[in-house]
């Protein structure tokens, strides 16, 4: 994301856990918060840790920095019906009590941003693929790591470059209080990715019974920026990844 914004002529400060304290009190036109836990399974195992990672860090950042526009990168998991585009558009009602710990804490972080940021944009993203990203099931399949969901799961993907372009488009629109779904059209099953890679997934305990099906409504975001299909996102990503070859 940083490279995309810098190519567009923006001056970007990259703040992370190691340099955070040194930037407390800094001011900027826009803060883009991509922080927080991205492991669904770990949130269920340790909800207290996930609350601190995904809610308290957001709350802290709202007061540690002075910004005009706060962009929070959230998740499509905050919807109760991730598989039904008629029920996961940005204006859909959400029952937070029915959410998983991971989704509930992201939902809480969103409400915190809306409460305390002077202007805000919340981007609910699908499963992100891109260089250097290690917290997704496609990476797990590529590297022989265990899946924490069934290979029959169907996910709405998006690539990191498109997420960066969506951020830039949203910032250019200067929203007051807006929410956008940032996900490619349609979905791709992990079984399909298995076939393309010629591998068989390793499953973590209980993963076989965890079948997730996503199909996210992206109409609002598509009005600002053309979006790819999930199949295109996956195919382009797999084509960009070096593969081990046998002599």
Image: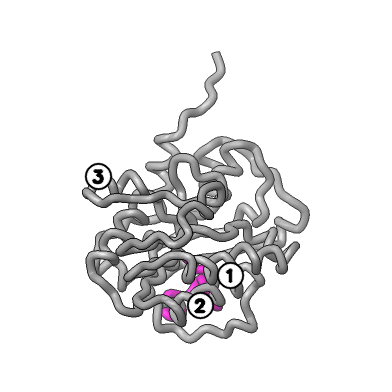
| Percent x, y of residue 13 | 38, 50
Q: Which residues are magenta?
A: 74-87
Q: Is residue 44 left or right of residue 237?
A: right
Element type where label 1 sits in the image: helix
| Percent x, y of residue 228 | 32, 55
* Residue drawn at point x = 25 percent, y = 71 percent: 174
* Residue drawn at point x = 28 percent, y = 46 percent: 6
Say whether disc 1 or disc 2 marks the residue closer to the N-terminus.
1
The reply to whether callout 1 and callout 2 are in contact (CB within 8 Å) is yes
Q: In this figure, which residue is indicated by the disc labeled 2? A: 112
Please tell me how crowded label 3 is: few (under 14), some (14-19), or many (20+) other residues with Cα within 10 Å.
Answer: few
Residue 123 belongs to the span the image colors magenta: no
Above or below — where is 227 with respect to 176? above
* Residue drawn at point x = 37 percent, y = 71 percent: 121
Label 3, label 2: how many angstroms apart (C-alpha)? 31 Å
Of the pair 241 and 15, the residue shown nearer to us = 15
* Residue drawn at point x = 49 percent, y = 56 percent: 127
Q: In this figure, which residue is indicated by the disc labeled 1? A: 55
| Percent x, y of residue 138 | 54, 46
Above or below — where is 196 with respect to 44? above
Above or below — where is 227 with respect to 19? below
Q: In this figure, which residue is indicated by the disc labeled 3? A: 7
Residue 85 belongs to the span the image colors magenta: yes
Looking at the magenta stretch, what is its main secondary structure? loop
């Amino acid at each position: 994301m940083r490279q995309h914004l810098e190519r567009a002529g923006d001056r970007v400060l990259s703040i992370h856990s190691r340099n955070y304290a040194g930037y407390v009190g800094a001011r900027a036109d826009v803060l883009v918060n991509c922080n927080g836990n991205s492991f669904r399974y770990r949130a269920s195992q340790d909800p207290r840790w996930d609350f601190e990672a995904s809610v308290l860090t957001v709350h802290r950042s709202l007061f540690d920095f002075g910004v005009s526009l706060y962009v929070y990168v959230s998740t499509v998991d905050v919807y109760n019906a991730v598989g039904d585009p008629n029920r996961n558009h940005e204006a859909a009602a959400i029952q937070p009590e029915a959410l998983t710990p991971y989704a509930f804490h992201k939902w809480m972080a969103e409400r915190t941003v809306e409460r305390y940021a002077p202007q805000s944009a919340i981007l609910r993203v699908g499963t992100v693929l891109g260089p250097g990203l290690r917290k997704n099931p496609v990476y797990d399949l590529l590297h022989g790591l265990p899946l924490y969901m069934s290979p029959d799961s169907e996910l709405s993907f998006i690539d990191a470059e498109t997420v960066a372009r969506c951020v830039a488009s949203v910032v250019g629109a200067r929203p007051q209080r807006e929410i956008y779904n940032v996900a490619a059209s349609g979905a791709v099953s992990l079984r399909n990715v298995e076939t393309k890679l010629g591998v068989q997934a390793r499953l973590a305990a209980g993963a076989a019974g965890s079948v997730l099906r996503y199909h996210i409504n992206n109409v609002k975001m598509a009005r600002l920026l053309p979006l790819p299909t999930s199949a295109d996102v996956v195919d382009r990503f797999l084509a960009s990844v070096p593969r081990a070859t046998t002599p």
